[in-house]
């Protein structure tokens, strides 16, 4: 059953990636267009973090202690059994003092209809996980929901979902923080046009 589900998600992911690439043909962007796109993503990240800190002030502590973090803006749709989305974001590697611009595509299985816009903030406690995310880019989601409060850090994790050990996720919707992650496959990869 798990293999069948994996194949289904992989097929949907391939379809979404194909559609995304077809809808966004590669074009050579001018230096001005690249600078404007970078500035928009940096502003989006700032606005998202400001909003997150208002909702969860403890998130600032977690991000300040982390080796790096990423902020993505996503737009997705779901029709009947399949859904997908695409977005752009920026990774802040605090140790290297670098910004890495990235893209994302996702596929989701399950019944539903609708359009959804949301923002993601991923927090990486260590350099190893951050580098793996930047270089490999895969993040496979599963079912889960949590309002994390762990160990001696106490409320620093409140509102974050543990994606893997040392990697935390905040998902912001128009209504606030989403405390649930539904079954979906997401591919993150470097944006060659902006890096």
Image (cartoon, rainbow, N blue to C red):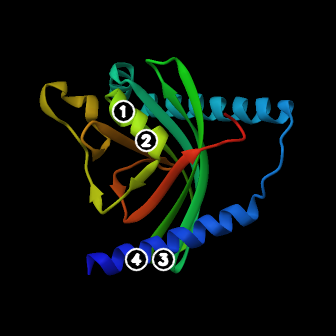
Report the residue marked by disc 2: 133
Query: Mark 3 against mark 2, which lies toward the viewer?
Result: 2
Q: Which of pointers 1 and 3 lies earlier in the amino acid sequence?
A: 3
Q: Which mark is residue 7?
A: 4
Q: Which of pointers 3 and 4 lies earlier in the amino acid sequence?
A: 4
Does the residue at mark 2 contact the one at mark 4 (Cβ under 8 Å)?
A: no
Left or right: residue 163 versus residue 34 is left
Q: Residues within 10 Å of mark 4 (few under 14, many from 20)?
A: few
Spot occupied by residue 87 in the image (x, y as percentages of width and height): 60, 51
Spatial CA distance of label 1 from label 2 is 9 Å
- Write the residue at 48% across / 40% down: 135
Spatial CA distance of label 3 from label 4 is 20 Å
- Write the residue at 48% across / 77% down: 112
Spot occupied by residue 43 in the image (x, y as percentages of width and height): 65, 30
Spot occupied by residue 28 in the image (x, y as percentages of width and height): 84, 44
Query: Mark 3 against mark 4, which lies toward the viewer?
Result: 4
- Write the residue at 32% across / 41% down: 160
Q: Nearer the viewer, residue 14 or 171?
A: 14
Q: Nearer the viewer, residue 135 or 91?
A: 135
Per the image, label 4 sits on a secondary structure element best described as helix
Report the residue marked by disc 1: 124
Q: Which mark is residue 159?
A: none
């Amino acid at each position: 059953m798990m293999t069948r589900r994996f194949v289904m998600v992989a097929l949907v992911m391939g379809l979404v990636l194909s559609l995304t690439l077809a809808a966004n043909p590669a074009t050579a962007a001018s230096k001005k267009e690249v600078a404007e796109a970078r500035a928009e993503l940096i502003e989006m990240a700032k606005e998202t973090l400001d909003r997150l800190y208002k909702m969860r002030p403890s998130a600032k502590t977690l991000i300040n202690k982390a080796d790096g973090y990423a902020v993505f803006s996503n737009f997705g749709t779901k029709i009947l059994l399949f859904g997908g989305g695409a977005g752009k974001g920026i990774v802040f590697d605090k140790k290297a003092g670098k910004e890495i611009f990235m893209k994302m595509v996702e596929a989701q299985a399950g019944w539903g209809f609708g359009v959804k816009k949301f923002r993601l903030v991923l927090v990486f406690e260590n350099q190893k996980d951050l580098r793996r995310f930047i270089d490999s880019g895969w993040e496979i989601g599963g079912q889960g929901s949590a309002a994390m409060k762990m160990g001696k850090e106490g409320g620093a994790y409140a509102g974050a979902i543990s994606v893997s050990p040392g990697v935390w996720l905040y998902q912001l919707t128009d209504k606030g923080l989403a405390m649930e992650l539904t079954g979906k496959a997401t591919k993150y990869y470097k944006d060659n046009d902006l890096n």
